[in-house]
Amino acid sequence: VFDKLKVLNLSGCYHLTITPDFSVVPCLVKLILDNCISLVEVHKSIGHLKAGLVLLSMKGCKELMELPNELCQLTSLGKLILSHCSKLCSLPNQLGDPMSLTNLAVGGTLLTKLPNSLGKLSIFENLLLDDCYQLKELPSSIGHLSKLKILDIGYCTSLATLPSSVGDATNLKKLVLDATALEELPDTIGLLRKLEILSLGGCKMLKILPSSMGKMRKLHHLDITESQIRELPEDFGCMSKLSVLHIGQNATLGSLPTSFSQLRSLAVLHVDLHNVSVEKIPENFGNLSSLQSLTLFNSKHASLSLGQLPSSLTKLHASNCSSLEWMSDASNLVNLRELILTDCVNLIDVHGLEMLKSLQFLHMNGCVTVCAGLKNRLVKVFYKLKAITFSALFDGVS
């Protein structure tokens, strides 16, 4: 009856403790056992599906602790999904033998290491290890994954080093390292010339970025918030495709390199100035000719002023910047549609604000010290705004 069955979906069979004998379904192509929360054993007969099984999904099987070695006989297996199998502590040593495997998702498991045989997977593309909080190392063979495009080891909080061989995975496009215990990145990371996304948010032990990062000419998204990075590489501005940069809450970050102004593709800049040496943040962003969105948060130390800003800006957001007192002539911001200045309690004036012909949204809550001249000039632009929010800004204005 079942000898022609190609898809078997037993998801949510909460009382299933062991899978059925798979020898009776030899033509199975997809096997889905998601959220079988009582499953503790995968029957060894799964090896009989070696000719045709391309997908095996067992995500959320919370009691599953191990997999049978027969799994390595599945020579057609392309996707293996084991995410949130929260008691899974090991993978078969020969998991790399099914040469057709392209995707492995094991995030949220108890893995402490990966089998070295993964390096055999010549067409492997996606490795998702997020939230494997006991993972302590990656095998050096990871550099053999010449087709690897996505490597996600975010929130692997016990991972303190990356093998230098990661630079050999030259087709890598996305590398997620958020909230790991990394103190540094290997200099070979600069060999990842096709890397487009690098996420290092919450790497609280990370103190330095390698100088080779300037060679990553296709990188367009970089997040380095909440780290211990002291400085950015001098050739940081050589990342000519960088369009989104999140930076801030870096307790020891000083000045930005002079090459920063060369980031001509930068469109979104998010800077959280909490604990940052703001007196060394450059005042002039005018050379960032593609910048569309500039967000500044939590500048409380020293004095902060914004000099000439690029005319490409469409959104400017400064929040909780008590050190912001002045904005120089803003009349060149001909494309600015949204200006949000909240809780900038020492802000006195924004020169040229009444000249912003594209402005549609203006929010200035908590800017309690703005001068009377600015208040009077603002009256002239009210009629063209779609949304406006103030907090007692016009008390006493005639």
Image (cartoon, rainbow, N blue to C red):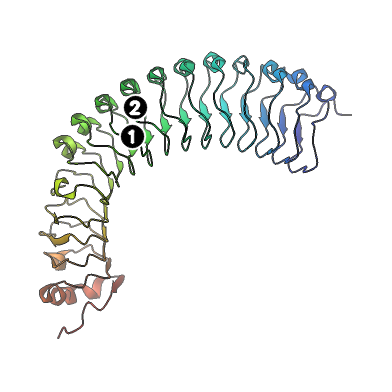
Q: Are marks 1 and 2 in contact (CB under 8 Å)?
A: yes
| Residue on which disc 1 sits | 206
Where residue 109 appears, as percent x and y from the top left, is: 59, 34
| Residue on which disc 2 sits | 185
Where residue 321 appears, as percent x and y from the top left, is: 23, 59
Where residue 318 appears, as percent x and y from the top left, is: 25, 59
Q: Is residue 308 above or below residue 326?
A: above
Q: Is residue 229 above or below residue 149?
A: below
Q: Residue at (12%, 64%) from the top-left corner?
A: 352
Q: Disc 1 and disc 2: Cα gap in Å?
A: 8 Å
Q: Residue furthest right?
A: 1
Can see residue 196? yes
Horizontal relation, residue 287 to residue 2: left or right: left
The N terminus sits in image quarter = top right
- N-terminal label among 1 and 2: 2
Q: Residue at (62%, 18%) from the top-left corner?
A: 95
Rendered image quadrant of residue 166: top left
Q: Of helix, strand and loop, which one carries label 1?
A: loop
Q: Which one is in front, 242 or 203? A: 203
> Please, what is the three-letter code of the amino acid marked with disc 2?
Leu
Rendered image quadrant of residue 383: bottom left
Horizontal relation, residue 256 to residue 132: left or right: left
Q: Is residue 90 above or below residue 336?
A: above
> Please, what is the three-letter code of the amino acid marked with disc 1?
Leu
Can see residue 282? no
Q: Of helix, strand and loop, which one carries label 2?
A: loop
Dot 1 surroundings within 10 Å: few (below 14), some, or many (20 or more)?
many
Dot 2 surroundings within 10 Å: few (below 14), some, or many (20 or more)?
some
Horizontal relation, residue 225 to residue 126: left or right: left
Horizontal relation, residue 101 to residue 346: left or right: right
Where residue 101 appears, as percent x and y from the top left, is: 59, 21
Q: Residue at (22%, 32%) from the top-left corner?
A: 236
